[in-house]
Structure formats: C-alpha cells, structure tokens
Amino acid sequence: MTVGILVPAGFLLEYFCATTFFRFPNPEATLQVHAPALGGTVPLEEYAFYLSGFTAILIIYLWLGEYWFEAYNVPDYPAEAQKLDRLLRFHPGATGLGVALLAMGILYKKFFAADRSGFPGYFTVLVLLGFVPAAGFFQAAKPLINWRALGLTLFFVLFISLLWETTLAIPYGYWNYQDRQMVGILIRAWGGLPIEAVFVWIAVTFATAIVFEIVKLWQASGKRLRHAFLGQQKL
C-alpha cells in the first residue's frame, strides 16, 4: 500500500515537473524510449526511477528495522493505534520548519545566489514533499518510526545516489539541472552539484517512513479510512 501511494505521486511529479527542473543533454545515455511529460518528453528511466527508488527505500527501511534494529520496533501496533482518536493531526513544528526553509531558499535565490533569475521551484517541491506528510502525520507516526533504521537507511540511500549522480549521471549527461529552478547553493567538491540533489533523498526517505508507519497504523486500527484518519464524527 505504501508503494501504491508513493509511486503514483512520484509519477505525477515527474509528469508535471520534470521538464521544468531537469534537462537530459545526452539521449545516448538512456534507452532512448520517450515517456510523456508536460511540455515535452522524458526518458522512460525517469518513471522507472520512481518505482524502483521508493521500493528500494522501503525495503532497506524494513530490512534494517525487522532484522538489524528489531529491538527498537514497537511490538504492538493495534495497542498503539487504539491510543489515537485520529491519525491526521496538525504538527506546528513541522509546518514552521517547512515555512522557514521555503523562506530561506527564496531569500537566498533572490539576494545571494550567483544566478538570481528564476525561482527555486525544485527546492519548493522538495520541501513540500518532505514536510506536508510531516505536518499532517508526524505526531501520530513519531513514536512508531524506528529512528535507527531510518538513519541508516538515509545513509545508504544518500551514499548510493550521490555516488551514482556524481560519477555517472552528470558526467555522462543522463540528466542535469535547470539552474533557474535551483536555489543556487552548489557543492563544489561534487562537480557543482546543486544542494537539491542531497535534499531530495532526505525528503523522500523521511516521507516514505512516515507514509509506511501511518498505513501500518491504519491497518492495525481496524477502522475505516475516514474514521481512522479524521476520527469519529459527532452527530
């Protein structure tokens, strides 16, 4: 169910945002099979990326949580689910942090970046991806997230993805970034890689863990969807 929620959301992001945020300078680095996107086409691998990426993150988190850090799992989800009258709860801390990050990104782009044209659209989408689930569900999911498993998952995902991007994807022209849509903070040691390339994996991994734990809580509660997420409606 977690993959069924996240992968279609990723497909929608790809369709609406890919041609705005990315460019694909070397078609020979791909299968040269074109998939639809708003304003043009993208390599088919872009859609496979969302399917395999979300699945890989979830599998790593599960493997670490169920095997290496099993002692830190919550053993009784039904009991935890019964403690909550609803799963959807506003979390002011996550909302405030998200708003602050957005403000800092926009201010940096407009006043400090080397290229101040455009708008940090990719950074904005990543903040929303990371903090919208957190703003609505972090309060319910926080006690159940295996934080040790999540931390090591993030390490593995960042290591593999950045190694791939800096040694293969960017040098061979599989993809690159539209500078006008970036904040403008570049990692010089990694060939001028935008900071968004790091932040995307933090946001995606965090969102995956939250969605998984919320789905698991909902299933453990035995309640209908509306009742579990919004609580018992008073007549």
Image (cartoon, rainbow, N blue to C red):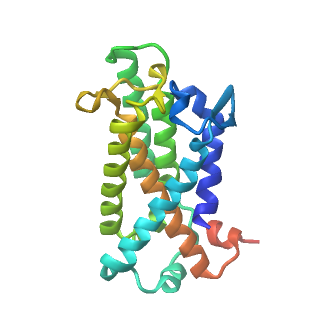
Q: Position of residue 134 (x, y in %)?
A: 47, 54
Please name the residue shown 61% across and 35% down the image: 32
Q: Is residue 91 visible?
A: no
Q: Is residue 89 visible?
A: yes
- Judging depth in this view, the residue of 113 and 230 nearest the camera is 113
Please name the residue shown 53% across and 75% down the image: 84
Q: Quadrant of residue 187?
A: top left
Q: What quarter of the picture does the N terminus occupy?
A: bottom right
Please name the residue shown 42% across and 85% down the image: 75
Q: Position of residue 30 (x, y in %)?
A: 55, 37
Q: Position of residue 165 (x, y in %)?
A: 38, 39
Q: Residue furthest right?
A: 235
Q: Position of residue 186 (x, y in %)?
A: 31, 27
Q: Quadrant of residue 7?
A: bottom right
Marks counted in the figure total: 0
Q: Quadrant of residue 166?
A: top left
